[in-house]
Image (cartoon, grey):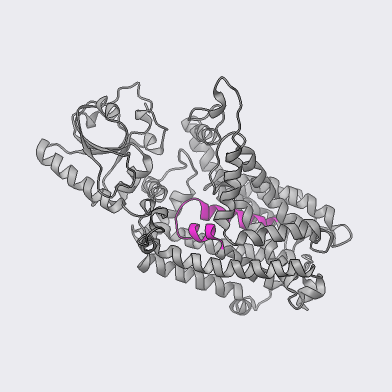
């Protein structure tokens, strides 16, 4: 009986020859298929949003393929390049890999919840929760590094559990674990935090499993070697590129963390020594609740249940593994807030395994047939909280998921409109159209081919994507006292190129004095159309004379 496998994690249904038939009857498979097809249709025919700056920048990477890049591995560029090669260059094609990655994440979270609990319905509930969380609704439709990163993290967590609980050879699951971490490393380096998470989960699971479950399988040398080999086979491009370039990615990451040796000034380097702003920590915690929406209550409830009652039951080993996988990434980024401000999406990898735990918890507290016989639900108050938090997650997730598809319409509503950051989602096409008009004017006036130089890398990438011929756009960030960017590493965007001397240019962002160092004459023209930042001005430059070999980006 299915109920006899609930919260055991030691027995799994054999694959058998009827796997396809079972797949067709699996509600998780239908959920994934339905959501994925809906997202594909939306991106192809209904999405009103232009590429955000990060998406456009990764597209810039994809048309200059390399072993790695200044701030990230090559995974996002390779994925976009493959998608645009198959589908052509369009907003939908750029974003399609995120849809695929979200489907993989959903499948992995569902499999993890099912295998840890031994109850198939837990997988379906966990899959629903994953797709109801606003943060994962966002990332499934925007092609940043987050969606593929979460997919790799989730697969690694599932492989880690299977490596210890079976079935199948330990070496095979070790290879999958290493491959998932290696692939994730190509997207986001903090995927390495899953390794201490899995180790903590294994250790804690073994401690709580004594007397409640059959002994977990030992970690074999063969399994470890398979994991390391798979990781090395996928992650080597990052090491090779950085070794050739002097390890700039290390400096970039240190700069993000606000510590010495990075590529930006250190916040704690003043004469007053270390200082801490509690707002940094509170802000990060608050942002997690905002990104998860109503699903926050489900995660909090499931963790509280596990820590108070669940860990002393047959759910103990599995729950310990799921919480253990999430702990290092949460602790790491909470620690970062003691030195600098952290971005809200940084700890998001902690949520997939916690959602798997939540899938089992909701079934336990709701007294679902089979679950109730294997694990007694808690007091009436906890059952009521589980029921209300589940319903709130469903309704809030559906409402938010629908409304976010047309935030441009919501922005027309008084009072609500100003709070919607449409400047990040719209305006790039209009900016590029205005830039093309300005370059045409300069070409007629000077008889020379104008260049387009923009201070911020994201805006430079966005304008490049939406220009009529997708011509090269230059980024002057590092030369105008800003941070280095990937533009400093490409020959065709090198502002030290002597062939550029004497040319006019459309200049966006930065200060007039900074542009005067590089051009013989500079004229302020106000803002380009579609600009959402009031302090970002545009200029016309005449007679490019270069920044000299002593420039910051030289």
Quadrant location of the C terminus in the rendered image: top left
**Magenta region's main secondary structure?**
helix
**Is residue 485 rendered to the left or right of residue 437?**
right
Taking the spot 71% from the left edge, 56% from the top edge, the residue there is 322
541 and 1: which one is in front? 541
Q: Position of residue 318 (x, y in %)?
A: 76, 60
Taking the spot 79% from the left edge, 63% from the top edge, the residue there is 315
Compared to 284, does 97 lie above or below? below
Compared to 341, does 330 lie above or below? below
Quarter holding residue 372: bottom right
**Is residue 183 rendered to the left or right of residue 228?**
left
Taking the spot 37% from the left edge, 62% from the top edge, the residue there is 413
Q: Which residues are magenta?
A: 133-160
116 and 128: which one is in front? 128
**Is residue 359 rendered to the left or right of residue 139?**
right
Taking the spot 76% from the left edge, 52% from the top edge, the residue there is 202
**Is residue 77 rendered to the left or right of residue 469?**
right
Q: Give the tally of numbered discs.
A: 0
Residue 212: tell me if it is visible: yes
Quarter holding residue 415: bottom left
Is residue 94 on the magenta stretch?
no
């Amino acid at each position: 009986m299915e109920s006899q496998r609930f919260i055991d994690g030691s027995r799994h249904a054999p694959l058998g020859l009827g796997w396809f038939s079972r797949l067709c009857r699996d509600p998780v498979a239908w959920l994934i298929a339905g959501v994925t097809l809906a997202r594909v249709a939306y991106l192809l025919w209904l999405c009103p949003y232009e590429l955000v700056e990060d998406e456009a920048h990764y597209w810039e990477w994809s048309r200059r393929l390399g072993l790695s890049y200044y701030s990230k591995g090559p995974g996002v560029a390779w994925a976009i390049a493959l998608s645009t090669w198959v589908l052509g260059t369009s907003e939908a094609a750029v974003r399609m890999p995120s849809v695929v990655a979200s489907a993989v994440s959903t499948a992995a979270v569902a499999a993890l919840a099912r295998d840890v609990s031994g109850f198939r319905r837990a997988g379906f509930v966990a899959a629903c929760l994953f797709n109801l969380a606003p943060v994962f609704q966002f990332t499934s439709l925007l092609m940043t590094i987050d969606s593929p990163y979460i997919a790799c993290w989730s697969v690694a967590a599932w492989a880690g559990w299977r490596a210890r609980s079976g079935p199948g050879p330990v070496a095979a699951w070790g290879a999958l674990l290493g491959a998932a971490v290696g692939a994730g490393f190509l997207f986001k380096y903090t995927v390495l935090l899953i390794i201490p998470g899995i180790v903590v989960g294994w250790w804690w699971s073994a401690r709580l499993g004594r007397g409640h479950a059959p002994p977990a399988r030992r970690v074999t040398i063969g399994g470890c070697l398979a994991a390391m080999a798979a990781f090395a086979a996928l992650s080597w491009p990052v090491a090779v590129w950085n070794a050739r370039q002097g390890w700039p990615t290390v400096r970039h990451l240190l700069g993000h963390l606000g510590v010495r040796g990075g590529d930006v000034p250190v916040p704690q380097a003043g004469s007053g020594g270390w200082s801490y702003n509690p707002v940094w920590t509170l802000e990060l915690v608050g942002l997690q609740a905002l990104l998860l929406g109503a699903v926050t209550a489900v995660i909090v409830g499931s963790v509280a249940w596990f820590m108070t009652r669940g860990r002393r039951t047959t759910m103990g080993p599995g729950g310990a593994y799921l919480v253990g996988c999430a702990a290092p990434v949460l602790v790491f980024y909470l620690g970062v807030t003691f030195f600098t401000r952290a971005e809200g999406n940084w700890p998001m990898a902690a949520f997939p395994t916690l959602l798997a735990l939540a899938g089992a918890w909701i079934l336990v507290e709701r007294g679902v047939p089979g679950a109730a016989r294997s694990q007694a639900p808690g007091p009436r108050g906890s059952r009521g909280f589980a029921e209300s938090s589940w319903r709130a997650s469903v309704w809030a997730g559906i409402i938010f998921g629908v409304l976010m598809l047309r935030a441009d319409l919501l922005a027309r509503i008084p009072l609500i409109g100003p709070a919607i950051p449409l400047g990040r989602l719209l305006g790039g096409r209009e900016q590029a159209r205005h830039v093309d008009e300005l370059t045409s004017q300069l070409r007629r006036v000077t008889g020379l081919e104008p260049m387009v130089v923009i201070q911020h890398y994201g805006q430079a990438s966005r304008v490049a994507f939406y220009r009529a011929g997708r011509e090269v756009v230059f980024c002057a960030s590092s030369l105008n006292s800003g941070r280095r960017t990937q533009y400093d590493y490409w020959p065709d965007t090198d502002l030290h190129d002597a062939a550029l001397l004497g040319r006019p240019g459309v200049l966006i962002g930065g200060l007039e004095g900074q542009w005067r160092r590089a051009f013989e004459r500079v004229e302020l023209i106000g803002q380009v159309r579609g600009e959402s930042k009031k302090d970002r001005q545009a200029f016309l430059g005449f007679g490019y004379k270069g920044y000299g070999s002593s420039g910051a980006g030289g």
